[in-house]
Amino acid sequence: MSPAVFELERLAPSARALLRAVQSAAGRSRSPMLVGGAVRDARLAPARAAGPADLDVAVESGALDLAARVAARLGGAFVPLDPERGAARVLARGTCLDVTDWRAPTLEADLAARDFTVNALAVPVRELLSRGRAAIIDPTGGLADLRARRLRVHDPRVLTEDPLRTLRGVRLEAALGFRLTAKSARAIRSAAPGLAGVAAERVRDELLALLALPRAALALRRLDALGLLRVIVPEVDAMRGSTQPAPHRFPVLEHSLRAVAGADALLERLRELRPFGDELAAHAAEELGGGVRRAQILKLAALLHDVSKPETRRLIEGRIRFFEHDVRGAARARDIAERLRLPGRARGVLEKLVRHHLRPGHLAASGGVTPRARYRFYRDLGEETRDLLLLTLVDAAAVTGVSPRAVWRRATVVRDLLEGWEETPRAGAAAAPLVRGDDVMAHFGIPPGPEVGRLLERAREAQSLGLVATREQALAYLDSPASEPLE
C-alpha cells in the first residue's frame, strides 16, 4: 500500500508562511518535521486548517536555537518553554509555533511517545515546501484511527508520565467528535489520580479549553465518568449525592451539569434572545484576562453555583433547606478559582455570580423590581449584570430539565433587568455626589470610619433614585426614617 500523502495546500496561507520561515531558519543542516495537531486536522478536514496558524515542529536537536531564529526572522516573541528538554514557542503575526527536540533517538520513537496516535503523525517540512506534498510518517496507526474516528493511546505509560494527557484526551474526544477506545478509557481512569500532581496552570488551561467547547457539559460528564472531575474539583463528590426538595428533580451535581448544558445551548444561540441578543453575544465573548472569556466563566459558574449546598443542607420542620449556600458557595468558588490559578478578574466574576445567583429569583418572588431594588442590583452586579441573568436562565431551566429558552419566554424579571441595564444610566454613577465625607462627619459629628461610607452610599442611592437633588436635601434624607439601611 502506498503511503498517505499530505498536501501543502491543505494548510492555511499563514501556516505555509510560518513553515517557510522555519525551513529558512533551519538551513540545510536540519530537517524539521511538522507534527501533531496541524497534520491531524488538515488530514481530517481541510476546513479546519483555514484559521490562524498554530503549528508544532519537531527537530532532532537545537529546538531553542531554531525557535529563536524564526522569532528573529518574523519579528516575533521567543518564549523558552522547557530549556532543559528543548522546547520553545514563537508568537508572531497572530501565529503560534511550538518547536521541540525529539524525546527519543529516532523520529519514529519520538512519535510513539506522544499522547494519542492521531497526534503521532509527522511530515518533513523541506519536502512539503519543495514539492507541495510529502508522505506522512505514521508509526502508530494514527491515520487508521483518524478514519475510524477513534482516539487511542499507543502506550498507556504516556499517561502516567504526564497525567495532563488524561484531561487532554477527554477534550480532544469532545472537540473532534471522536470516541476513546475502551482500552484508552481504562488507561485514563487508571492514571486519573496522577492529575493531582500536575501544575495547576496546566490543568487550568486544559479545563478552560474544554469549557470553550460548544458541548462542554458532555465533556464534563465524561471527565466525571473517568474519575477526572473529582481530581480537578473534589467538591463534586459531595454534590453528587445531595438530594434537593421539589420543584427540583435532580441531585445537586446532576442539576449543575444540566445548568452547564443549558449554558452551552444558550450561548450557541444568544443572538436569538431579541432584542438583547447582539449585546449579550458581544458581552459573552469579552476577555477577562489571560485569554479567559466570560462565556467560559459562565459555564464554570453554572457548575459551581450550588457547590455549598451539601455543606449547608439542613432538615428543618420536615423541609430541606440550604441557608446561606450562596454566601458560603461564593467563598468556596473563590478558593477553587485560586486553586486553579484563574486570572484575578475571572476569579472575581466567578465569585460574584455564585454569591448573587439567587437574587433574580428573590426579585421575581417579591412581585417585581422596584426602583430601589433595581438600583441595588445594578450597584452590586455592575458589569456582571448580564452574566448573572444568563446564569439565572440556565439555573432555572435545570431545576426540572426544561430548555433555557422556555424559561426566557416567561422570565419577565430577567428581561426587565436586561432592558433596564441597557436603558438606565448606570445608577447615577456619572453624576457628582451631592455630599462628601466631610459633610457627613460634620453633620453627624462622627469620626472617619465605616459608618461614613454607609451614609455616603445611602445618600448616593437617594440621589440616583431622584429622591434628593441638593446637598441639604441629601443630609435631611439621611436624618429621616426613609433612609433605611442598605441590604
Image: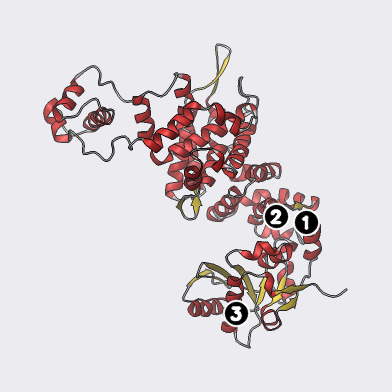
Residue 314: image location, x then y, percent: 55, 20
Which badge, 1 or 2, comes first in the chain's sequence?
A: 1
Tag 3 secondary structure: helix
Q: Is residue 400 above or below residue 151?
A: above
Q: Which residue is mark 2?
A: 176
Tell me if label 1 and label 2 are in contact, CB under 8 Å: yes
In primary-sequence order, the first of circles 3 and 1 is 3
Q: Residue at x 68, y 73 (%)?
A: 9
Quickly name the residue at label 1.
Answer: 149
Q: Residues within 10 Å of mark 3 (few under 14, many from 20)?
A: some
Q: Which quadrant holds the C terminus?
A: top left
Estimate how packed mark 1 is, as few (under 14), some (14 to 19) or many (20 or more) residues with alpha carbons within 10 Å.
Answer: some
* Residue type for callout 3: Arg
Q: Nearer the viewer, residue 430 or 82?
A: 430
Name the amino acid type tagged 1.
Arg
Position above or below: 450 against 347: above
Q: CA distance from mark 3 to mark 1?
A: 31 Å
Separation of marks 1 and 2 at Cα, in angstroms: 8 Å
Residue where numbered disc 3 is placed? 20
Residue drawn at the location 77% of the way across and 70% of the way down: 138
Amino acid on which disc 2 is placed: Leu
From where the camera sits, is residue 445 visible?
A: no
Horizontal side of 302 relative to 148 (left or right) equals left
Outermost bottom residue: 28
Question: Please, is residue 203 above or below residue 313 in the view?
Answer: below
Determine the secondary structure under disc 2: helix
